[in-house]
Image (cartoon, grey):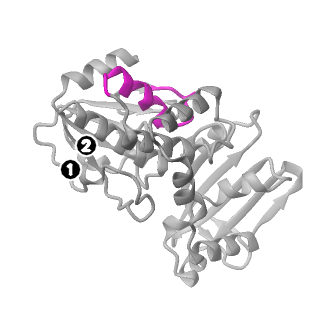
Amino acid sequence: MNKSELVKRILKAHKIAVVSHKKPDGDAVSSLMALVLALHKLNKEIIAYTKTDFLSQFPFLPGVLFTKDKLDAKNIDLVILLDHNVLVRGEFQEELSKRKLPMIIVDHHPLTVNPDGLLYYIDDKAAATTEILFEIIGLLGVKIDKQIATCLLTGLVTDTNSFQNQNTTLKTLNMASDLLNKGANLSKIIKSTYREKPLSDWKLMGRALNNLKYIKKYGMAYAFLSSRDLKELNIDKEKASGISNYLILSLKEAKIVLTLIEEDPGLIKGSLRTRDASINLNKIAEVFGGGGHRGASGFTINGKISHQTGEIKY
């Protein structure tokens, strides 16, 4: 499916549902809000469905009034899956798989297989899904205002680590410049997403750094947090995300960074990052049933992490 076909489908639809992936990050959340605000301008009946309360993490994002946490499939004539490309990674996997609703994937993650047989528009060269939506919203004839610009820029900032990752391109920076001209506040976005961290976040980072190991042979650093670590610090498991991003930007010796977090007893989430363009982390993550991008990927496995040694049993 090309961009013009996607735009035609959206314009033809009347009641549209937009859905993100499980544990939505900044790009996922801001993609939801940007598209909702844009389609609302076209007088579409549009609802963003999410089971995640993201207000505490992204309180500055507009559009929250258009969100619901329970899927109402009545009269929906189009579902748009944002920032993920298989149903199993979506927040409403079970509900959507039971219903024969027309669905389209809009994403920037590489699509290796299409098990659900869905229509899709994917640009894996885009730095973020909001980079794709910037073009789509323009083709829909919607004028990007300050609110939409804020959402779109938030996706760029969070998925490029403030324009520091290798997926940052000239196109990305030109888009960011355009969004700033439209009223987006870059300093506020960065302050809210990166700088203003509560003490509990820093204690968590301290525990991860205390567990940090380095394998010189492979140029790989890895850190781990056991479920006991999370319990002792009384930290929400969602707060543990982002450690890999911090390490790959800050640790001089590391070509690859891996963080392993036992989010629940017996369930480990792995996060891979690299700044070496010759390394494809997506291929590594796929071995463990995960995926993502060349420079940033993740996976989830069943297993336990030893609190003392970091030894993994799975």
Residue occupying the far left of the picture: 75
Asked if residue 265 can be seen in this view, the reply is: yes
Q: Give the vertical position of 5 relative to 132 (above or below).
A: above
Identify the image quadrant of the N terminus. Answer: top left
User: Would residue 20 be found to the left or right of residue 45 on screen?
Assistant: right
**What's the magenta region?**
122-142
Q: What number of labels is visible? A: 2
Res 92 label: none
Q: Residue furthest right?
A: 217
Residue at 66% in and 75% down: 306
Residue most extreme to the bottom: 232
The Cα–Cα distance between marks 1 and 2, rounded to whole angstroms, is: 9 Å
Q: Residue at x 60, y 62 (%)?
A: 195
Q: Residues within 10 Å of mark 1 (few under 14, many from 20)?
A: some
In the rendered image, residue 238, in percent from the top left (x then y), is placed at: 49, 65
Mark 1 in CB contact with mark 2 (< 8 angstroms)? yes
Q: Sequence order check: which comes first, mark 1 or mark 2? A: 1
Q: Identify which amino acid the numbered label 2 is placed on.
A: Leu
- Name the residue tied to disc 2: 96
Q: Secondary structure at mark 2?
A: helix
Report the front residue among 183 and 135. Answer: 183
